[in-house]
Amino acid sequence: MHLTESCDEDSPHIITHVETTAATTQDVTVVPSIHQALGEKNLLPQQHLVDQAYTSAQLLSTSERDYNIDLLGPVALNVGWQAKAGLGFDLSHFKIDWQQKAVYCPQGKRSYLWKKNKSVYGKPVIYVEFRQRDCLACPVRSQCTHAKTNPRGLTIQAQSDYEALQKGRERQKTEQFQKQYQLRSGIEGTISQGIRGFELRDCRYIGLAKTHLQHILTAAAINLGRVFAWLEEIPRAKTRSSHFARLADTIVC
Ligand code: SF4
């Protein structure tokens, strides 16, 4: 079950969409259908806060392009050995000239191959390769490739996806991102409320359609309770901390 809720400070936090899928469905695959459903209900947000399981380079760019939504969440880091070592030349060290379909390496060498390809997930990617003679003679080769004789090759995403991912990686380093992202924790409270107060994890019916109906009814009940609390000016509960965390705070203070 994937819940979407509003999180404006001055109004009740209302569940705006309920998506029910088989448990094996990957989170990242449901984002387009959630946006489509929200659009049909005229409830598209300007910004959609999600955890990392719901972000990908392609989703960052298509959410903005198709729905004008800023999809905000942690994005995958560069996992190549060059990035992990911190001393090697990962993709961020290369300059891409999209017009000329060429990439320039940290030594200023220009790639000779630019080939459209598909990733293992069927997404469009571009394979780039440098000249063997340049790479074999390169004085910093060990920071670039572990290949014995082959030149450095790079796989890059389509331009819009690549740029959206780089933007996301830069943004998640900022304090503003951390502050905005804190709001996402509210949905964890909603899921907890559904599980503890409404037995959300106990599926009473067989089949996705009936299960979805159960989820819709649960969400409607939660919404009614929230609207009532808002009308009665009952403040939202604060996040609880464990006895141990409270004790640790007391000792520190
Ligand atoms: S190994 Fe090749 S791609 Fe890497 S820095 Fe040297 S010349 Fe450039």
Image (spheres, grey):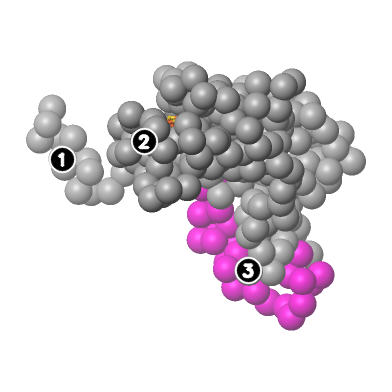
Amino acid type, residue under disc 2 in the picture: Arg
Q: Please tell me how crowded label 2 is: few (under 14), some (14-19), or many (20+) other residues with Cα within 10 Å.
A: some
Q: Is residue 65 magenta?
A: no
Residue 91 screen position, x and y as percent = 50, 33
Q: Is residue 195 above or below residue 13?
A: below
The label number, if any, that marks residue 141 in the structure image = 2
Q: Is residue 93 left or right of residue 10?
A: left
Q: For numbered disc 2, what is the local secondary structure?
A: helix
Q: Is residue 203 left or right of residue 33?
A: left
The answer to whether residue 252 shows anywhere in this view is yes
Amino acid type, residue under disc 1 in the picture: Ala
Q: For numbered disc 3, what is the local secondary structure?
A: loop
Q: Is residue 46 above or below residue 242?
A: above
Residue 226 screen position, x and y as percent = 64, 41
Is ligand 1 within 8 Å of the beta carbon of the residue shown at mark 1? no
- Which residue corresponds to mark 3? 23
Is ligand 1 within 8 Å of the beta carbon of the residue shown at mark 2? yes
- Separation of marks 1 and 2 at Cα, in angstroms: 50 Å
Q: State if disc 3 and disc 2 touch (CB < 8 Å).
A: no
- Which residue corresponds to mark 1? 248
Residue in view at x 82 percent, y 33 percent = 66
Region in magenta: 186-212
**Quadrant where the N terminus is found in the figure:** bottom right
